Image: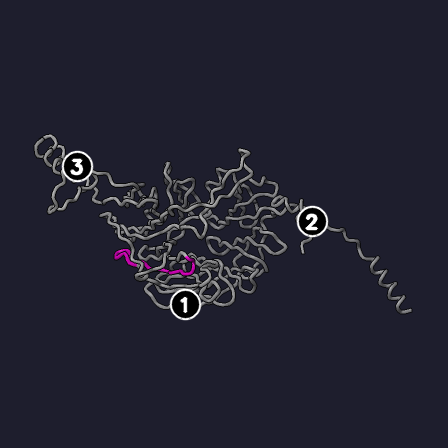
Amino acid sequence: MQIRNLVAISLICVLSLPSQTPQPKLTIETIMQGPRYSGYAPSGLRWSGDSQKLYFNWKRHTDPIPAPMDTYVVNRDGSNLVKLTDTEARLAPPENCTYDEARNKCLYTMSGDLWLYDFTTDKTKRLTATSDIESQPRFLPGAKEIAYQRSNNLFIHSLTDGSIEQITDIRTGKPSPDEEEPKRDPKKELTAQEFLKQEEKDLLAIVKQRKELKDEARARRLRENPRKPYYLPARNIASSLRLTADKAHVIAILNEQPEGAKTAIVPNYITESAYTEDLTARTKVGDTQGKSRLIVIDTKTGEAKPVDLGLGEKPKSTRIFNLVQSEDATKAVFLLRSDDNKDLWRMALDPATAKARILTHDHDDAWIGGPGIFRIGFLGNLVFYQSEVTGFSHLYLQPFAGGDPKALTSGNYEVTNVEQSKDKLLFYITTSEGSPYERHFYSLDPSNGVRTKITTAPGEHNVVLSRDENWIADIYSFTTKPDEVYIGEKKSGAKLQQITTSPSPEFLARKWT
């Protein structure tokens, strides 16, 4: 009797439950719609100078897949989300740029020309309009001049009067015969051709006169411009040209393309020509790799000295990269990575003597790599960097003058991003602390190591601070939520307002568990 009553009650409960509409079947055809179904992830967050507007790159799920990302702007309170026209987008704050010391202005390149964005007025200004490609612009100390690279050379552009000065004379090819006076050993006997040339000068007055005029012109040219040119070796290009604070030296990385290396052939079957074409690829890891070396050029004489890396008599083959100067351009550091990818040196450079010294050395029998492992910068007289010496990528400080490094973070998690506050008193870091599947945003005081967690919602946070550092823009995602833009106050646990909705209605209608 009790069993029959229990069955009856259970049946009544089941029949009285509201019916649930089954979810549509998730098919291969649906999945293969790609971003037309799941949406396009926004990117490129950047704030206006007054921290009132947020700019970012985005596409609606209905936009064609081959179409480029559009630039959108939204008010800080989430109102008035607008897609900018191409003209408006060119005048918006740049996605990547190099700041002055006060972080009020920044330099960037667009279509090979130099531009300056002023955050105090939220206006952009074009600095160059040439057929050459200008690159790597940066402010010189005082922010009244900028330095940039064009055709293997370094130039200074005055922001006060617009004047331009070429600081180096780096050339390709070989010197012309009349560029340098040939040097001959006086003790060595003249060859037959040299004897005839000498006799021609001595016997014919016009030849002698021409020679004298040519020598006078050369002497005058040297007086006006005593800097001699530096000729790049074959297959070399100059990069990362950096001017020292006293403008006496230029530091340059010379990259040599590998000779005889074969690139991988990658076929492209979907082409406009209807024929299979080859895609540009790179050399294979085991093939001949490019080389690099560091030189210091005297800006007055043009003399170039190779930098002594101080790695001993039989150093490993290495590549030089990430040359970084302090904001006052009085200090410089760079990275050395061995060609077998097992060693990484962080180096300090003295341009006056063209000598480098080792700050730290990491070795890994497997492979040097990891989040932020090639990040390096300055905090006053200290150098900050990331290292996986413990097996996890963490943030360290070390005196530029030398000394033991100090770990600012530690534990079984990774530091995935590091930024400095505007006043340089704080670091803002993103870490995987708590779970390898999450990324959270913290402030970190380097003076005492105190960290404050700002984002709290479970998932991955990619945060960009407003210029006044009171607000955050966050590209946030979770296992059941695709990337979207959110805005909120920079407070621990503050509620964030969702700005974008990227997926299609069909995607949003599905219950993702």
Give left or right: position of 303 versus 111: left
Instruction: Name the residue at the right extreme.
Output: 1
Few, some or many C-alpha atoms within 10 Å of disc 3 (few <14, some 14-19, many ≥20)?
few
Amino acid type shown at disc 3:
Ala
**Alpha carbons under labels 1 and 2: distance apart:** 52 Å
Magenta extent? 340-355
Considering depth in this image, is 497 or 340 the residue closer to the camera? 340
Residue 146 seen by the camera: no
Q: Report the residue marked by disc 2.
A: 26
The location of residue 217, given as percent across then percent down, is: 17, 36
Q: Are marks 3 and 1 in contact (CB under 8 Å)?
A: no
On the image, the x and y values in percent for residue 450 come to 47, 67
Residue drawn where x is 75% and y is 51% of the image: 22
Choose the circle earlier in sequence order: 3 or 1: 3
- Could you say which is closer to the camera, residue 215 or residue 21? 215
Instruction: Specify the amino acid type for callout 2.
Output: Leu
Neighbour tally class for label 1: few under 14, some 14-19, many 20 plus, Cα within 10 Å: few
Which three-letter amino acid code belongs to the residue tagged 1?
Answer: Lys
Between circles 1 and 2, the one closer to the viewer is 2
From mark 3 to mark 1, how far is it between C-alphas? 59 Å
Relative to residue 410, is residue 355 depicted above or below? Answer: above
Question: Which residue, given by chain and number where applicable, does mark 1 sit on?
Answer: 406
Q: Secondary structure at mark 3?
A: helix
Which mark is on residue 217?
3
- Please tell me whether residue 345 belongs to the stretch shown in magenta: yes
Residue 188 in the image: state x and y as whole percent. 12, 46
